[in-house]
Image (tube, coloured by chain):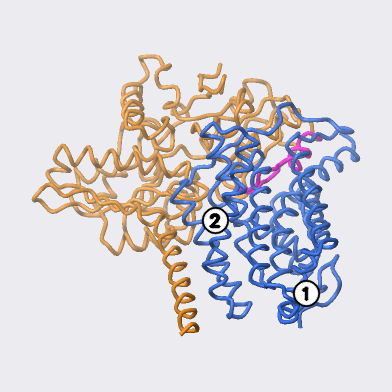
Amino acid sequence: MVLRFRRMSAILAIALILGLLLTGCGGGNANTEKSATTETKEPYKIGAIFDISGTSSSLGIPERDTVQMIVDEVNKSGGINGHPIDLIMLDNKSNETESALAAKSLIQQGVLAIVGPSASGTTMAIIEAAQKGETPLVSAAASIRIVDPVKDRKWVFKTAQSDSLVAAKIATYLKSKGLTKIAFASMNNAFGDSGRAQFEKAAAQEGITILVKEKFEATDTIMTSQLTNIKKAAPQAVVAWAIPPSASSFTANFRQLGLTMPLIHSHGIGNKKFIELAGDAANGVVFPVGKLLVAEGLPDTDPQKAVLVDYATKFEANKFGTRNTFGGHAYDAIQIVIDAVKKAGPDKAKIRDEIEKTQNFTGISGVFNMSPTDHNGLSLDSMVMVEIVNGKWVLAK
Amino acid sequence: MTLASELLQYILSGLTMGGIYALVALGFVIIHNVTGIINFAQGEFVMLGAMFMVTLVGLKVPTPLALIISIILVMIVVGLIEFGAIRSARKASPVTLVIITIGLSTAIRGIALLVWGTNPYRLEPFTKGGPINIGGATIIPQSLWIIGTTVVVLVLTYFLFEYTYFGKALRACMVNKFAARLMGISPQKMSLFAFVFSAALGALAGIVIAPITYVTYDMGLMLGLKGFVAAVLGGLSSTPGAVIGGLALGVIESLGAGLVSSGYKDGIAFIILLLVLFLKPGGVFGTSGSKRV
């Protein structure tokens, strides 16, 4: 009897653990949210994949919130030509494999288009699925490789400024400040590698010499070894290409080692999390980013100002946290898809053609002019240089 | 910057990371010594300690009090886990128990994701003040806290295991459970104690490293693996070995990142693990051959 009781309790314990495991994993997947169907017309299925948990979650969470907000708005005002949007949102846990599985699942469910994912690596992982599944994909990630070479990317678009554009922006800024000998540090992943390749190109064009190149892991928290190498090279400025938390650790270590040259980051730090984690170390950091962060400070003549202020107000009113450019990329992606579906109806090939024809769409990341040779459609003036002063973003001079 | 100060910088950074690994490795060694199993949930104890600390400090609890409460909370959680999951399966083979700890680690991480979400949290350093300059290299005060904590904990556990009756009883359970029971030692109590003590160590590690590493629900995974590498380096059954293994791993990683390539830092750690397991399975610092038959 006692023995049986023990065996029972062992089985019970294992069942309990399994249960916990399931709920644990389920937490990530539970983000499959479906919008309520209110109309009688058949709903349009639109898929979304974001890096909602894991290392890129600081990007994925505002993107999820933004897309949900826009879809709710559209559905409340009658949907697309009377068809409500059935949004199927999946979390790829910042993992390439999960991302590919999510894309396959969405395509099997017959979505008209997919928005996301948030990061370059997770987007690269699903390009093949989108191409083969002939489903339009509008990514919110940065790497130029997502849409280049364009002949192999017929179905793929993206709304974030390309890293080539960001690299050119940083290189021109450095040149204008007379900083021509610099050090470069990047995350050891697709985002960092692509940024590094693009920056090398841009730097060569502007006549900037890269004295030393360093890498760090997304999970690294102490980067003093890399920074010591940088210190040794004595550059005039340091360019870092990363997202928080590693970008924050890098910045904190940079100050701790007593480095005093200007520190320029990429657009990867365009959220408050960077400042929150880096604390005072963030002050003085300069980085190029879409105009959203400094929307209210823009001149009234800026064509994007009204759209930016409107989105920022709504985002912050919904208590999603502080505005950030990642949510903006998702805003552009879902808007472009909705506009295309509005014109093309439920036909994936026609939707793709309409996305490619997008002209003068005033979004959050810039004014988009897509074409068969440019599946991003943004230009250099879609970005401004921003400086962090007392934990706030201000337009850099 | 001279080569000497450059090397010193790598070593100081390495010792900071190494101190973290050593604290995690100690937890592995203690549980292994007493129960003979490798507890892969050790990294999650670290995460729980740091998470409780961040939460309590966020509720305006003073730092020293928050530290004590966090450690006690983790000890209670782990005590309950030992009682529920490990004890009820004690008739199972060590391999099964190891697999249970892997499941536990995933479960704890999953719950932490639900409770604290995916965002990283920040904890203020224990002491204010800028970096300290030593011979051209810099070290931040929190690193000294980490290294200091490692030293104190090492001395305490070494003393506990080698010189107290209680420590000897703990080790007796490892050498021969049956004989220990004949001597009036309860292996069940000792197993519970080993888990709770390791939990306290893990929690303490999590709390002292939180100001440097930021706290995320999945921080335990990598720390657990690196701590395991450190423990294996040290022979898996020696407490000083675990600490030396941890510090050595930290320094090797740091030197590797600085002198070879920063892209291969984690790779270096796992290559070391494989080399040790192939060439010297008893650990670099441990006695060769396992005590267990």
Q: Is residue A256 left or right of residue B196?
A: right
Q: Could you tell me which quadrant the C terminus of chain B lies in?
A: bottom right
Q: Which residues are magenta?
A: A213-232
Colour chain B appears in: blue
Which chain corresponds to the colour orange? A
Q: Quadrant of residue A263?
A: top right
Q: Give the mark nearer the N terminus: 2 vs 1.
A: 2
Return the x and y of residue B44 as percentages of the image width and height.
58, 56
Q: Is residue A138 left or right of residue B207?
A: left
Callout 2 environment at 10 Å: few (<14), some (14 to 19), or many (20+)? some
Q: Is residue A143 magenta?
A: no
Q: Is residue B279 left or right of residue A156?
A: right
Q: Is residue A214 magenta?
A: yes
The residue labelled by disc 2 is B77
Q: Element type at marker 1? A: helix
Q: Which mark is residue B278?
A: 1
Dot in front, 2 or 1: 2
Residue lying farthest to the left in this orientation: A40
Residue lying farthest to the front in this orientation: B184
Return the x and y of residue A112 as percentages of the image width and height.
26, 54
Q: Is residue A130 above or below residue B128?
A: below
